[in-house]
Image: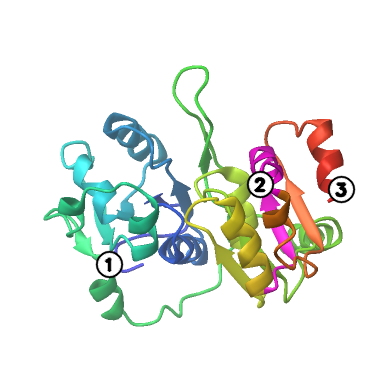
Amino acid sequence: HKLGVRQGSSVCILMRNDIAFIEAAYGAMRLGAYGVPANWHFKPEEINYILRDSGASVLIGHADLLHQLRDVIPPGVTVLSVPTPPEILATYKINRDQLATPDFAIDFEPWLAEQAPYDGPVVPQPSNMIYTSGTTGNPKGVRREAPTPEQVAAAERMRGMIYGLKPGARALLPGPLYHSAPNSFGLRAGRLGGALVIMPRFEPEEFLALIERERIDTIFMVPTMFIRLMRLPEEIRNKYDISSLHHIIHAAAPCPPNVKRAMIEW
């Protein structure tokens, strides 16, 4: 709000899986604005297109991802730089010379600490604005109107019944938050008062260990993850207690029938 974000505005989020991603998305939604997750694999000119097409007035991103954008940020866009966290540094090959806040950006954490808590009016909260993969021309932004209170209530009942997303759910998110389904799952799960555990990147044995350690009951996955789990040695698959798990949601490409059967038997 201090940066001029208002109802209907767009805030571009360029981060890997991180708590700050969730903070930025919730902040935008609280104002009735659209969070616009950008695929962090995109080239600078592709990020420029997203910023221009969405009309974003703010870009918030991991410091190392911002350095490449110096010459492509449209005029009038405020840039907030989030420190690249240790778990991301340990997971990806990142240029350690690009971890400082770029000179064209505001250091997010000190800036945030200076702000008073927002106590403005409650407005309808839209979901994030997700861009398609762009298989025909440029990616297209999907911008949905904010749901009515009745629509919100009906959707929450459906998600609780089908997906297990109920108050107190302990959810695990191994997929990237810039994708539509993981994004929707993660933002909803984070509001349920249980736990939202975010993996920087899917690693099959770590995935099983997290289910046991965090007593996870609800997960969103994609078929590739099932396949990688089934490729683990049997002694590794059987090493961890996953009895807390009640719901597995999967989307994207069709899951091969043999993989589904193997997971059910397991």
Instruction: Decide whether residue 47 is among the magenta residues.
Output: no
Comes first in the chain, label 2 or label 1 = 1
Comes first in the chain, label 3 or label 1 = 1
Q: Residue at x 52, y 58 (%)?
A: 199
Q: Residue at x 29, y 80 (%)?
A: 113
Residue 201 at what x, y percent from top left? Answer: 49, 51
Q: Nearer the viewer, residue 147 or 48?
A: 48
Q: Nearer the viewer, residue 265 or 3?
A: 265
Residue type at the position of mark 3:
Ile
Which disc, if any, is residue 232?
A: 2
Q: Residue at x 65, y 55 (%)?
A: 185
Q: Residues within 10 Å of mark 1 (few under 14, many from 20)?
A: some
Q: Residue at x 83, y 42 (%)?
A: 262
Q: Which residues are magenta?
A: 215-233
Residue under numbered circle 3: 264
Residue under numbered circle 1: 108
Q: Is residue 84 visible?
A: yes
Q: CA distance from mark 3 to mark 2?
A: 16 Å
Q: Is residue 77 left or right of residue 42?
A: left
Q: Quadrant of residue 172?
A: bottom right
Residue 18 at what x, y percent from top left? Answer: 44, 61
Q: Quadrant of residue 188?
A: bottom right
Q: CA distance from mark 2 to mark 1?
A: 40 Å
Total labels: the figure holds 3
